[in-house]
Amino acid sequence: MSPLPVILLGGGGHAKVVLDLLRVLKRNVLGVCDPGLADQGIQLWRGLSVLGDDHAVERYAPADIELANGTGSLPGNTLRYRLHTQFTRQGYRFATLVHPSAILGSGVKLGQGVQIMAGVIVQADSRIGDNVILNTRACIDHDGVIGDHVHVAPGAVMSGDVTLGDGCHIGAGANLLQGIRLGSEVVIGIGTTVLTNVAAGHQQTGQPPRAPRRINEE
Ligand code: JB2
């Protein structure tokens, strides 16, 4: 059975990457819903018809289409979460998209609406929740547990057996030690190295360097 046609939600920066991914996967994209584009009277965006605001989705029955969430998720911005929960409640499904250059190990499980971008590696037995973005070149090593609505930004590295609670944001280039557990809604700053667990609703940013020491001389 051929995959259902797709409607893209959002026409900003993240949506460009999602649209490229849909095209690489040869998905039939019916158009984009974006109130910003519609308000400006823009009818064509990157070769796609602008269908209107999100109400345009309702012209299609949930069984006849899939949605692609083209809105990104940055700390404090709930739009992506809101679109996912609202349309899921209405019975629509979000396409799970995996770039052909990504590597998925054995036993990996992906939730609904997961977006795995170019160059991502997800190792054996990792579980990825709904509406997650694993952005360009991110890495989840073995046995990772990634909650719903998480964004792992480009180049961030989760060592083995890391658990991220729902709604976490992992900044670009961050590194998490193996076995680290983050509660829900934790924000890790760009380039931050995380060596201890972080409780729900907290953030860890910055990178205090330590003076060089001889190995085995703590
Ligand atoms: O209610 C809405 C709505 N409100 C704003 N429904 C829909 N379908 N779209 C909505 N938008 C549209 O989302 C705006 O009109 C705009 O076109 C788009 C947001 O685009 P922006 O480029 O501002 O953000 P983004 O979420 O695509 O990307 C952010 O997050 C990514 C993960 C950026 O900061 C990126 O740099 C980042 N990579």
Image (cartoon, helix red, strand yellow):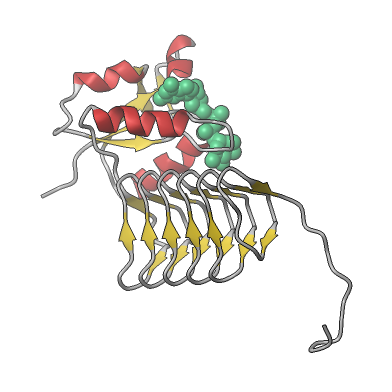
Asked which quadrant contains residue 61, the reply is top left
- The residue located at (27%, 23%) in the rendering is 57
Residue farthest front in this picture: 199
**Which of the pair 204/69 is nearer the observer?**
204
Number of numbered tags placed on the structure image: 0
Residue closest to the eye, 190 or 24: 190
Observer-nearest residue: 135 or 212?
212
State the image coordinates of residue 130 (x, y, percent, origin top left). Answer: 35, 46
Q: Is residue 212 left or right of residue 44?
A: right
- Residue 60 on image: x %, y %: 18, 24
Whole-percent x, y for residue 105 in the image = 36, 72
Q: Work out which quarter of the rendered image holds the C terminus and state it.
A: bottom right
Query: 1 or 195, which lies in front?
Result: 195
From the viewer's perspective, is residue 28 above or below residue 180? above
Residue 139 relative to residue 124: left or right = right
In the current view of this chain or complex, which residue is farthest to the bottom?
216
At 45% across and 53% down in the image, what residue appears? 117
Rendered position, 180 above or below 83: below
> Is residue 172 depicted above or below 47 in this figure?
below
The reply to whether residue 47 is visible in this rendering is no
Q: Is residue 69 left or right of residue 150?
A: left
Report the residue that reaches farthest toward the left. Answer: 1
- The reply, left or right, for residue 98 in relation to residue 213 is left
Name the residue rendered at 58%, 42% in the picture: 201
Q: Residue at x 30, y 70 (%)?
A: 107
* Residue 101: % across, % down: 42, 62
Judge whether residue 3 can be spotted in this image.
Answer: yes
